[in-house]
Image (spheres, coloured by chain):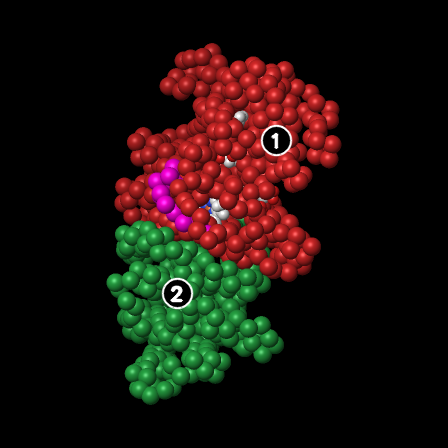
Amino acid sequence: MLPDFTNPADWLPWAFASLMGLSILVYVVLDGFDLGVGILFPLAVPEDQDKMIGSIGPFWDANETWLVLAVGLLLVAFPQAHGMILTALYLPVFIMLVGLILRGVAFEFRAKARDHHKRLWNRLFFTGSLMTALAQGFMLGLYVMGLDQTLATYAFAMLTAVFLAVGYSFIGSTWLIHKTEGALQLKAVRWGRESLWGVVLGIGAVSLATPLVSTRIFDKWLSFPEVIYLAPLPILSGLLIVWLWRMLRAMPFADDRRSWLPFLVSTCLFTLAYLGMAYSFYPYVVPDRLTIYEAASAPESLFIILVGACFVVPVIAAYSILAYVIFRGKATALRYD
Amino acid sequence: METLDTLILSRIQFAANISFHILFPTITIALGWVLLFFRLRFAQTADGKWMSAYRFWVKVFALSFAMGVVSGITMSFQFGTNWPGFMETVGNIAGPLLAYEVLTAFFLEAAFVGIMLFGFSRVPGWLHMLATFLVAFGTTVSAFWIIVLNSWMHTPQGFEMIDGVAHATDWWAIIFNPSMPYRFAHMILASFLTVGFLIAGVSAFRWLLGDRSRDLRAALKVGVSIGAVLIPVQIFMGDMHGLNTLEYQPAKVAAMEGNWETQTNVPLLLFALPDEEARENRFEIGIPNLASLILTHHADGEVPGLNDFVAEDGTVLHPPVAKVFWSFRVMVGTGLAMLLISWASVWFMWRRRALHEGRIAGHWMAVEGLPKPILFALVPMAFSGWVATLAGWYTTEIGRQPWLVQGVMTTDMAVADVAAPLVLGTLITYLAIYAALLVAYISVITYLARKAAKGDDGRAIDMDHSGKAGVLAITPAE
Ligand code: HDD
Ligand code: HEM
Ligand code: HEM
């Protein structure tokens, strides 16, 4: 899996694929919980809704920026793949964008609009979050199916769309468990229990479908001795799921101890599932059609971006963490003062 | 035919999306700095009016910021969904510039905007001010990178073409391409003017509703002053920008002037209907020699004409004339209106202060001096910056056609192979959403202004006359 580090044409595309993969993962976890909170939104009573908004208010913008970075990296590092993927996914991308627009503006408008418009913006906030999650799940499904557009692949993509939306609700509820207290927290625990199945089915569906669609991926996983090296991945995921399930049955713990644990464990679970996918598709950026090496831009352009990224990404991580530290603790309704 | 339809629809869709997007950065770029100013004045004087002004305008900022972010995300997907050829041809240059924008600007603003908006009572004052500064700085940096890219598309240099793909040879030349400094300065000034008139207009509206609070007076004066000071600078910058364009994109200038034949003693046309079929203007009204004078600084200077940009075989290599001609006039006309109104406002306010020296000592200007007609004129001017900015961008962008990157690739080379009905469908949906959001945006600002005029800024304490009440009011609420 490791490239030849003496040859820029070899390691630069690899470095960019990793960087892009990393930002997609960070996006899925971070905006995943924002979107999940949005999907759970109508289930809460109005007073709690303000707290739910408060729990993501200071973060959602920065979280969404990881998507911009991921697309940006795809765009700059693998321009051909960027064109191929996004033209093939024209419609789901569009639906996701509409969802992101609605979610983002509804968030601001609901805080400022007159009271009788607030209901409308609440509804749009939910709709936008749901649309985004469904569209992303749909794209995931089509991507796994090698971007083929047939009835069967659409059916599969519909399934992954639902699973991803439920999966986001799951990570959203683990976030709420950490950021809220009292009745809302109890509800979040229940939501978490009820949506765990989405995560299980989602991971299951993608893991089963990927090797079936492509013999290349089948061999990568199920030939000897790979199957032994890779065994820890599914086993660990299974253990994490069991742990989550048991924890969610017992929560909240006394004195609200370890309220952050479910979120952390689900992040690990998402990461494992993601690593599995990355392993399946590497070195392809468009499944079975275009490798990262064929799609990469000129090395000199990649290099100049990488130099900047090495300086800037740690700084970005630092101040993102700063924001989370400043707004740590239980969420309150948001105020500008 | 199929691809032609997709091309036109994609162009309209791109223009619609970017036009919608640019409205909000135009506000946030300068409003960030104005908020920093309010915040610093509050720290300096402990006068609650600055904090009230901050609190009102930070809401507008938050709203505009969210609109800018969501429409910006749409923009970054557009390249892939509609214009794959753009990145495939010039991706080696456009890519790093866009990447630097994301890395150095977007994350900076996105991370600190949370602290700026919601952190007032959670972080020490200096950190809140630092966050406000970083957000303002971030928006400006992001404007810088995108303008670098856009300017490079107009005046490309520092690259070589290998197998039809552009490769960078000199990054310094790419970033500091000839039109970048003008375009960047003109855009930043446009942003400040937009915000100046927005603040002045909304404040005039509140004043007309009977609001006489001190924060309103302060904001009105700040808004009008920004307009009055910067509009002459902007007109000067615009002139410089035009000279630069004359050098690098003469076809665009010919279209802006509606000048068909290369000739001397060209008049400045105030009105004309350019007719591309007949290749002449109808109903011309102009001021003799003025265009030559402005563009060459000689009354008998030579101005390029559109007929020079028609190939032997009849292919037209200049932009659509009427659109560029009229966009340009809308921009300049709005600029002149801005000049008139802001200077008149300052003059009336200054005169009133001069007449009532004793009573309102310590202030340069008194809002009471503004006559009703001026107040009424300021209200619609609240969005004049948007009009001028859009008109300016239309001049610039349509004036570059048929080129996408001047002299390197034409727009039709970049378009995606997506079915036309699909693009039509998404275009209509975008337009509907944008129209609804614009209505919502403007009505929420009006609603906030009405609410503030009723003395309700979201807090119970009235801080009309004493700074002390204001200071009390901002002690942490939670
Ligand atoms: C508040 C906004 C505003 C105002 C009052 C003006 N402009 Fe402007 N103008 C812009 C906002 C703008 C802009 C939207 O920001 C543009 C588009 C691209 C750019 O760099 O600036 C622009 C472009 C632009 C261009 C085209 C540059 C090109 O070729 O690409 C010229 C020649 C001028 N301007 C000149 C003027 C003059 C002579 C003005 C005198 C009143 C003026 N502008 C007022
Ligand atoms: C922000 C203000 C901008 C506005 C209002 C604007 C507007 C427009 C318009 C109206 C067109 C269509 C021209 C025609 O169809 O004849 C166009 C074309 C284009 N502009 Fe801009 N533009 C802006 C900035 C930018 C920037 C910053 C970029 C690049 C980074 C850019 C890239 C393009 C591209 C790729 C096209 C080709 C597609 C087309 O012709 O429609 N524009 N723009
Ligand atoms: C093709 C052109 C463009 C693309 C792809 C683009 C992309 C974006 C994106 C993705 C964002 C959201 C960043 C975030 O998540 O915080 C954004 C915001 C922003 N854009 Fe653009 N943009 C374009 C044109 C422009 C132009 C022409 C300007 C100004 C001259 C501009 C100035 C800004 C600024 C200042 C922001 C900060 C957020 C805000 O204030 O709303 N952009 N843009």
Real-space Cα distance between discs 1 and 2?
45 Å
Work out whether residue B90 or residue A311 is closer to the camera in this orientation and state it: B90
Q: Is residue B233 visible?
A: yes
Q: x and y percent of residue A186 in the render? A: 40, 72
Q: x and y percent of residue A75 in the render? A: 44, 57
Q: Residue at x 49, y 80 (%)?
A: A213
Question: Does residue B33 lie above or below A125 as drawn?
Answer: above
* Magenta span includes B276: no
Residue behind label 2 places its C-beta within 8 angstroms of ligand 3: no
Q: Chain of mark 1?
A: B
Question: What kind of residue is marked 2?
Answer: Tyr
Question: What kind of residue is marked 1?
Answer: Asp
The magenta segment is B165-176
Q: Residue at x 45, y 40 (%)?
A: B156
Circle 1 or circle 2, nearest the eye: 1
Question: Does residue A36 lie above or below A200 as drawn?
Answer: above
Q: Disc number at residue A293?
A: 2
Q: Residue furthest front?
A: B312
